Amino acid sequence: MAPSTLAVLPLPHPIILLPAARITLPLNQSLGERILSLVDQSDDQPVIAAVPFTNSNGPDSGASILSQWGTAARIVRIVRPPPRNPRQPYLVSLQGLTRIYLKSPIVLNNNKNNKSKSVDSLVVCPVEYPDTNGVPSSESVAVFKGAALRLLDRLAKDASQPSRKDGWLKVSAMVEDVSDSKAPSMADVMVAAVNGEYSDKLAFLCTSDPEERLKLATELFVKQASISEVSKKIAASVDESLSKQQKEFFLRQQLAAIQRELSSLHTSRGGSGNTHVMGPDSSSGRGSELDDDEQHEMDDLADLKKKIEAMEHGSEERKMGVREWRRLKRIPQGSVENGVIRTYLEWLTAVPWPSSSTPPSTDLEAIKDRSFLRNAREQLDADHFGLDKIKRRLIEYLAVVRLKQMNAAKEAQADEQAFVKVQGQPAGADALPPPIAPRTGKKGVKGPILLFVGPPGTGKTSLGQSVAKALNRPFQRISLGGVRDEAEIRGHRRTYVASGPGMIVQALRKAGRLDPVILLDEVDKVGQSNFHGDPAAALLEVLDPEQNHTFNDHYINVPIDLSQVLFICTSNTLDTISAPLLDRCEIIQLSGYTYDEKMHIARKFLLPKQLQANGLTASHLTLTEPALLHIATRYTREAGVRSLERAIGAVVRYKAVEWAEHSDKGKGESEWEVLVQESELERILGVARWDGEERDREQRRGVTYGLVVSGVGEGGILPVETLIVPGSGRLKLTGSLGEVIKESGEIALTWVKTHAYDLCITNSRSEDALKIPDPIDIHLHLPAGAQKKDGPSAGIAMICAFVSLLTGSCVPKDIAMTGEITLRGRVTPVGGIKEKVLGAHRAQIKKVILPWANRKDVEHDVALEIRNEMQFVFVRTVVEALEAAFGKGGLGWRRDTMLIESRL
């Protein structure tokens, strides 16, 4: 049922909505919110009354009266303005349904001083629905069709677009086939579609009788057809007169361009005599005819031309630049292709080619300096504490680069002297052929590729910056984390829209030299192969010293020499890096810092940095050594120092607030408490995250302590707990264990069962230690069940736990162990020795049992002060490991039998 009352929406002048038509209106904020509330309150699309103004000038000033005739319209859609630009209007789409009549007229009072024509009112008014379904006479319908078809034929002929012409022809076919009963509705559609005066359309809207509407529509169509024919005649006469003026203007412009070209050619011939491979510049000689923007445009083009001419003669980049420049001059300035070519030339000339990238003399002077290596060591020591093994490798790296650069400089100097000498010889039959002029650059200096692998926060990126400072070269960092498209490395081809060069070329442009230090950060996080290509495979050419001297970027499409670039890669792990990529890199492992190193780093680097960042000085805050150590051990647990820096920053910010309040009270520095004690840390940082549970160990039967490395590179100890429960001789493993560590538990139990007689657990070799005298099960658990654990390093700890459980002997609580085992009782080496030893040292372990093959890792990676504080026992077999864990005589071995090891 149609509603008897409708909200009235005044239509802005000169819009009139007719039935069967659809319009979209902009509304101000108040009207838009009101319409939006109607939509929210209605279950279906609400209907409103779209009513035009009676005044043909619209609501310009004074009182504006709305027409009593309008159209019931359905709100089809409403679009809110975006939050970032709330000044934009609301947009509402209305679909006309039928004519309506307002029972009472509506007068809108507008402020004369307000020049805005928007109406903010939305009143509710009772409406009537007049009967408009009558059938007109056949004569009126025939006259209507004739006028409509003549108008549609005229509109189709005048249409400039084929799609619009087809649309008018379709409407013409509909008019021919329309019935007498549907003719009034067709008249509504056509009157809404064609242009017409406001008063004519308003009169058509206010007519409910179908016969009268057809007559009004016929008059409107005849008038529009006449106007269209007259307008076409006027346009034809105007075009005829304008064509003569345009032709004259075009010829004059051509004549001026020819004169400029002749003037430029004359200047180039009569000047210094230089030849231009790209021809004369058409921009010269315009003088004051150009405005500022055009002058800047010509200056930019002239700079491009100079850069191309400065390239080395005969080089690929110069040939490509000349070819594209000639294409640029043939294409009109406003063309899209002109902008594409110009952008390409800007990138081509921005790349540091050998002829345009001459290293500064200070670079070579720094290399020749006798104190170069000493300065490099000082630079590394100033930027990083510890990392002695890494620094030694970097010094070797810098020494090799220095020697290669010095040898290359000597060869280049000798070639230049030979070239000058031959150039001075007189021409003759015995004269030597002139050598090729030496190309500037550093021949033979191929940068090795270093790959720093280590946990986050251990200084991998800053090491690359230190190398760049020591070599006095520009440093560029490329983040490869999440790169999934090969084109981000090699560049997009120029056939694509918005194409551009890859990251390598962009880094070279920023550096401005052919020999920068480029850091490829997070190589292990490069996206895998997909339909965009494999970005890791694109790095193979970049990082291969035998191939990267002709690196091809898809956008530049000219071979680029990357052999002088020193590439340094960083990674957190090697597991996700492809084998071909690893083969091109020299891997340098960075392990976690010891607590002694963390204390020095915090005191020398982190605390001064945080004091400066938070507006304090060293006189405002002093952290005691116990407090700093407490922060490092109880509030952080990491291989690097990032969490330590955040914790120190929290302490500094807390003291900054106290200092601000202290200063506001007018107190002096003499009353200020500078020291931060260990007892204050809980009040500042809250409860410690780690409360030293590693040190709260107990010596119990069936419990041993193994060594582990966490996913972030932090080492620690892990208790191995075993317990006997009634059962049927099975082993139960819990603690979120992986497949490898489960297999280690089964191997350990098998070895114990095999040697149960030798360990005095059983009375004969045929007895099962888990079934005699009573059947039992062994439950092995590794605590912190929410953390997943896996890896081949828990075999020794599990065997010691099983032996302790079945014999009743206990392993001392200050002993920890790591190492994998075989069924023959051999102890195999494991990884992460430095991290595990540091974790044991933090937990105050006195004795560590390690595989014999890991002895060299302890000697090379573990600091001397830690080795002096702990006892290391290196074992080859399980028997040696049991003696080291339980002590000599701690287990009752049966020595009267001889074990024979058989080998196939």
Image: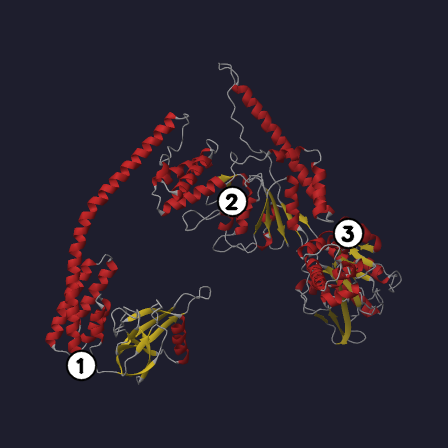
- Identified by mark 1, the residue type is Gly
Q: Nearer the viewer, mark 1 or mark 2?
A: 1
Residue occupying image coordinates x 77% and y 51%: 862
- Identified by mark 3, the residue type is Val
Q: What number is the disc on residue 534?
A: none
Q: Residue furthest front?
A: 113
Q: Name the residue beneath numbered marker 1.
A: 134
Q: Is residue 495 left or right of residue 236?
A: right
x and y percent of residue 237 in the render? 16, 51
SS at circle 3: loop
SS at circle 2: helix
Q: Is residue 838 left or right of residue 431?
A: right
Q: Are the residues at dot 1 and dot 3 in contact (C-beta closer than 8 Å)?
A: no
x and y percent of residue 313 in the render? 46, 31
Q: Name the residue beneath numbered marker 2.
A: 505
Q: Quadrant of the C terminus?
A: bottom right
SS at circle 1: loop
